[in-house]
Image (cartoon, rainbow, N blue to C red):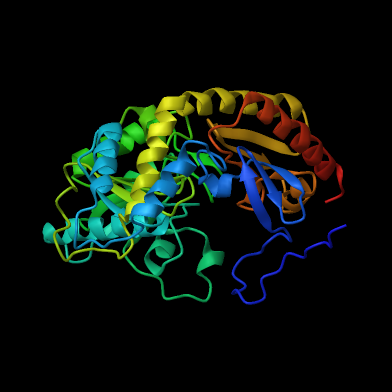
Amino acid sequence: MTAHIEAASPHTMNTYGRLPIALSHGQGCRVWDVNGKQYLDALAGIAVNTLGHNHPDLVPALQDQVSKMIHSCNYFHVPNAEVLAAKLVELSGMTNVFFCCTGLEANEAAIKLARKYGHDKGIDKPEIVVYEKAFHGRSIATLSATANEKLKKGFGPMLEGFVRVPVNDIEALKKATEGNPNVVAVFMETIQGEGGVNPMRIEYLKQVRALCDQKDWLMMIDEVQCGMGRTGKWFAHQWAGIVPDVMPLAKGLGSGVPIGAVVAGPKAAHIFQPGNHGTTFGGNPLAMRAGVETIRIMEKDGLMANAAKVGAHLRGGLEKALAGVQGVKEVRGQGLMLGIELDRPCGPIWSRAAEAGLLLSVTADSVIRLVPPLIMTEAEADEVVAILAPLIKTFLAEPV
């Protein structure tokens, strides 16, 4: 019998509250740890592994690319960067793309775009509207745009130039910006991920688009977590029938290969000029191939429709299993981006689910977040419900 392998990382910085699990390999929506235990993956690397694990079409394409070229640099053209950019422009109805490596980088670029947009109009101290419960990253600029004060502790002073408003309240937005000539942009997530799976209402998205048009502001929509087909449309804001001026992407765009992108519409497409922004690894051949292949496979296999269908099935199953359970406040979200809000902090659910063979996360203290691969089947969604619903009921029955 093989000895049990302890999961430990003593030489890596202690920046994550990790579970004592070390994953070894995966197949589809299943992963295995180094001791051979199997888990159903309803987390997908936090909305990253669009195609699950070891996808039979993706892996050979990446192997082919690795054998040709992994990295060049941005002194040269990268053929697949243009292929991927053209595809993102087509899917979004926007104009052009800047490639980077992460969601944080994409959001940082969006903030720089907004500031330069202001400076180009003669505004010396541009301000950007951001939201309560927002999360845009952990660099100083994106942390300043983020709402969570706990994350900021010890890293002040934060960057100035942000105006914070509540979600889904157009009057609050108008009031917060009234008479302020320095406002240049409104920056939001269509569905807040880290903030607790909080969707912006369709009517609100339309109202903000109209206000931005009226005021000549940039409407910047962070689709890092909710984009790339997860909600059943390519980008979650498309449910509202609007087009933003700036759209950061990352996570699911490369199915696990690090990639980020900022897609810009006509108002923002030509703000950056040579020397204004850059990144060593952005747009590298491997990441670009991953993006091209991810979208190709999503289209070929109808994964957006699958996300909508299986997501509705999963949500329906959860609502049925948790109906009338004291302490369950709401099941919400869209497609395969779902949150179950409880009336109390529920951190222990994270580890208990893993013990029961299910990977998920708990965010905003009291919201169980499910963001599985877009290849998930209805049978696998039923498994999620079968494991998770009893755990929630048991947890809520415990004394507070």
Closest to the observer: 55 or 131?
Answer: 55
Q: Residue 90: x percent and y percent?
A: 26, 33
Please indicate, yes or no, whether residue 78 appears anywhere in the rendered image: yes
How far across and down, in percent of the image, does residue 200 sit?
44, 37
Q: How many marks?
A: 0
Can you give x and y, in whole percent of width and height, for residue 207 in the image?
32, 34
The picture places residue 352, in percent across and down from the top left corner, at 78, 49
Side of 124 relative to 40 (left or right): left
Q: Is residue 66 above or below residue 85?
A: below
The answer to whether 43 appears left or right of 131 in the picture is: right
Report the residue at 52% width, 29% height from top.
307
Image position of 69 with respect to 303: above or below: below
User: Which image quarter holds the N terminus?
Assistant: bottom right
| Residue in the foreground of this view, choosing between 308 and 239 | 308
Which residue occupies 75% across, 27% down?
A: 321
Q: In this view, does 126 lie above or below 194?
A: below
Q: Identify the residue at horizontal 71%, vertical 69% (top origin).
A: 8
Question: On the rendered structure, is 1 left or right of 77?
Answer: right
Q: Nearer the viewer, residue 181 or 11?
A: 11
Q: Where is residue 233, by image quadrant? A: top left
152 or 21: which is nearer to us? 21
